[in-house]
Image (cartoon, helix red, strand yellow):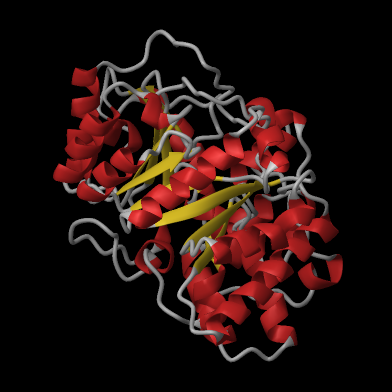
Amino acid sequence: MINLTKLWTGVAQPADSLRYGGGNGHGSCMPTEARARKPITVWNITRTCNLRCVHCYSDSNAMQYPGELTWEQMEKVVADLSAYEVPALLLSGGEPMIHPRFFDLVDLATEAGLKLTISTNGTLITPEKAALLKAANVAYVGISLDGIGKIHDEFRRKEGAFDGAVRGFKNCHDVDQKTGLRLTLTRHNVENINQILDFIEDKEIKRVCFYHLVPAGRGSEMQVLGADEARGAIDTMLARVESWHKQGIDRELLTVTQPADGAHLLVRMENENHPNLDEARRLLTWNGGGANSSGRGIANIDTQGDVHPDQFWQDIVLGNVKKLPFSQIWEGKNQESAEVLSTIRSVGLLSLEERQARMTGPCADCKWFNICGGGFRTRSYFANNGDLWGSDPGCYLRAEERLATCEVA
């Protein structure tokens, strides 16, 4: 994640320590470098969903799927994640609130000391359920929105989905449950960013995450943003961040699955002689972008118990929690995961010079490689036929921005 609010304004934000050092977010472990972090873990607890979104990476439908974890298996996963001290657990789906033991799982996870986030379409959040989420000390509820009114309904393939999501926001707001908006940027909704940002202001939403599209699942049929569209989107976000800051509004805006956003931010800061330039550069360099994300700082457990480097990278299976605890899989204790993790993590374990020397395409001679780590590795893997060292096709930096004298931290 790139926290535009933190980097542009310098104001402290939640989870700064996870992204930029100074703490691990759970327990007392404080990694000295990004590659030593425990993973934020995305757990798809069910594939069943009441919507059928056009960009769904899990290709979910309103049906039952065999083989999902039993309650006893889920209890063991929670105990293991807590003992392993993952910094945060994100429950997703499908639609996680459809799971028959959703609130039992929420209570179990929070009682185990896990920092819990819910990723939901929001349509099932009644006033009563919002109160239960608040009572369980859920850290954050992320509600997905892909446009205003009809645009959102078209993305979700259900009339009334937008109104349902709005009710979910309101119900959470009424009980003071921290809630944010999650949006996947595509070529079909990028022109509506200002409308989305206006909606956030009107509903007093305190957090928004803009995901760059990763072509996976049903989303594989959609197109990532063009370079000008991506640049325009980030510049629009930065203008709104600055406006909120000047008004004294505490609102967090982040982008996800595109480390090149950090490089673009620094280019802007350099050109404008921004007062936070040096600190933003230091924080982004510590983070390392894609070199320390999938398979290192982010992990996924799917509905069948299979463990993946992230929630989009479903064709790489590291092991299964029905057979071996997540912590042991992630530490490479089984042959299945050890070789794959070694390969994926070599992107981060090699020296900066060694990593970049292996890259092909624009990343090979980009001066910002120490900032973004070669972009989002999962999207690169898909686009380059399984080559881990190809460049991220979602990168939108111009040649003249990439090819200046290399700045290696």
Q: Residue at x 46, y 64 (%)?
A: 206
**Side (left or right) of 219 relative to 400:** left
Q: Is residue 166 visible?
A: yes
Q: Residue at x 52, y 52 (%)?
A: 181
Q: In this image, 22 relative to 337: left or right?
A: left
Could you say where residue 145 lies in the image, as x and y percent from the top left?
Answer: 59, 45
Q: Compared with residue 234, is residue 283 higher up or lower down, i.e. above or below?
A: below
Residue drawn at x 56%, y 66% is 201
Q: Is residue 203 left or right of residue 45?
A: right
Q: At which x and y percent is residue 169?
A: 46, 50
* Picture layout, residue 367 above or below residue 133: below
Total numbered badges shown on the rendered structure: 0
Q: Say which quarter of the image contains residue 315.
A: top right
x, y percent for residue 318: 42, 27
| Along the viewing direction, whichever of 229 and 283 lies nearer the viewer | 229
Q: Nearer the viewer, residue 356 or 137?
A: 137
Instruction: Tell me the residue at 26%/24% (across/down).
Output: 101
Query: Dividing the image into 4 quarters, which one contains the C terminus?
Result: bottom right
